[in-house]
Image (cartoon, rainbow, N blue to C red):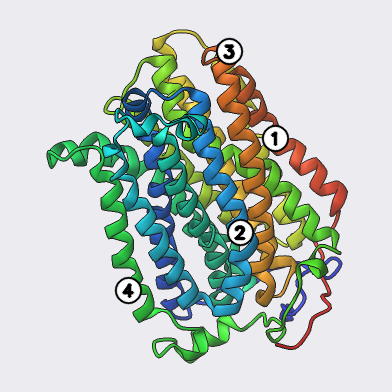
Amino acid sequence: MAKTDYSNPFAAGQPATISSPNAGKVRWIICFLLFYVTTVNYIDRGVIGMVEPKLAKLFTWTQADYGNIIVVFQIAYALGLLLAGRFIDWIGVRWGFAIAVAIWSLAEMSHGLLIYLPVNSTWAHAAWIVQLGGLSILGFGVARFVLGFAESANFPACIRAVAEWFPKRQRALATGLLNCGANIGAIATPVLFTYILPALKLNWSAGFYATGLLEFAWIAVWIFFYRSPRNHSMVSPAELAFIESEPDPPAQKVSWAELLRHRQTWAFVVVKFMTDPIWWFWLFWIPDFLHSQYKLNITSFGPAVIVIYSMTTVGSIFGGWLSGFFMRRGMTVNKARKLTMLAMACCVPPVILVEFIPGQKYLWLVVFLIGLAASAHQGFSANIFTVASDVVPRFAVGTLVGLGGMAGAIGGIILAWLVGHILTWTHNNYTIPFVIAGSSYLVAMGIMQLIMPRLVPITLKTANP
């Protein structure tokens, strides 16, 4: 049997079929480190959603106030993504990622101090503070801004590391595995507040400190262990040959303007703009939905949230595996990626029904539908992230993922503001938010197919570094 040429797996009619050799395990250790940091990253993001009922009571926030705090995070995340991919591509994954994690860890830990704000003091109600919605909103807004700006480096760095350590045929699986960190983080957050902190007799504010400490431990291991494959002492010749079996062009500089000239970039950006905000919706608003609709509180909605995000773990791995399965069966990369994403998109619309399901006795049906939609998002996300490394050389992956992530964050800004105000105007009626969530993926797939009917690599005009 003739060997397949992997230097261009996108050629017309070219099937992406090969058995992955069992060539070393170092790349999977790298994948685990990316999974770990993504897990704690999402605990950082999700903690505020878990404690929002407490914070709303403590600081008398409205849904619009909470929405504004989420908007500040999203603005910072969008601004950070504009620079994070370039920063990672410039300084490298090892040190660039470590610096970003250190900054966001300190920002997360600062949240725990904010519950001691002197909200009842005279100066706290000065006119300029009132105009900003109160000292608590200002304080949490600043903390969330720094957190969002630094956390924007997570996925550009992860996808760049995957591009360095995995050949194309394994990147969707590796991305799906590390992306499980988002799901595990979302599971770990209610576990932390429902079981661990009460068992240790710690206040709920201790959750902010715990995640920061976990991240500083990761930084030490990351700096010690991470190197590029060619410079890593533990990589065997067989594993290095496998990693480099689908070589990318030598590293060069590429501008945003050059990337934006190509329809593949716009397809990626549009899909991220339309689908990323839905994940933020699940992360930040589902605890409030369960609290307002089913009267669950910080200790009782933990099991429901755990079930939802346990399902997303399955979706993330399955979505990453499924496109690789299709390729091994002879499909082109274009068809395998898009068919997988379409299958995931078709699993989301049933979530629109949740607002019409009455009664406490149907809680677990509602949980299943939300879990199915969130699970499909993660399977979809594993493949759209991998599209970035499919269409550009690895030296430009961080920049492209940063552009797409920025678009997703901008979409998140719009959706967070919209959801906060819709819930305030409608007295916590979630019908419109769930309609938006249920329809976004199929619309995004239709637009993607119009812009990019074939998944073809971009030929970039670059300057030597």
Q: Residue at x 82, y 65 (%)?
A: 456
CA–CA distance in space, label 4 to label 1: 39 Å
Which residue in the protein does label 2 denote? 81
Position of residue 70 in the picture relative to residue 266 (left or right): left
What x and y, as percent, mark residue 346? 67, 35
Q: Nearer the viewer, residue 42 or 100?
A: 100
Above/below status of 217 relative to 189: below
Which residue in the protein does label 3 denote? 426
The quarter of the rendered structure image containing the C terminus is bottom right
What x and y, as percent, mark residue 315? 52, 45
| Structural crowding at the residue carrying mark 1, measured as other residues with C-alpha within 10 Å and reported as few (<14), some (14–19) or many (≥20) | many
Which residue in the protein does label 4 denote? 221
Of the numbered discs 3 and 2, the one sitting upstream in the chain is: 2
Which residue type carries mark 1? Answer: Ser
Which residue in the protein does label 1 denote? 440
What x and y, as percent, mark residue 239? 50, 84
The quarter of the rendered structure image containing the N terminus is bottom right
CA–CA distance in space, label 3 to label 2: 33 Å
Q: Residue at x 75, y 76 (%)?
A: 254
Above/below status of 231 relative to 415: below
| Structural crowding at the residue carrying mark 2, measured as other residues with C-alpha within 10 Å and reported as few (<14), some (14–19) or many (≥20) | many
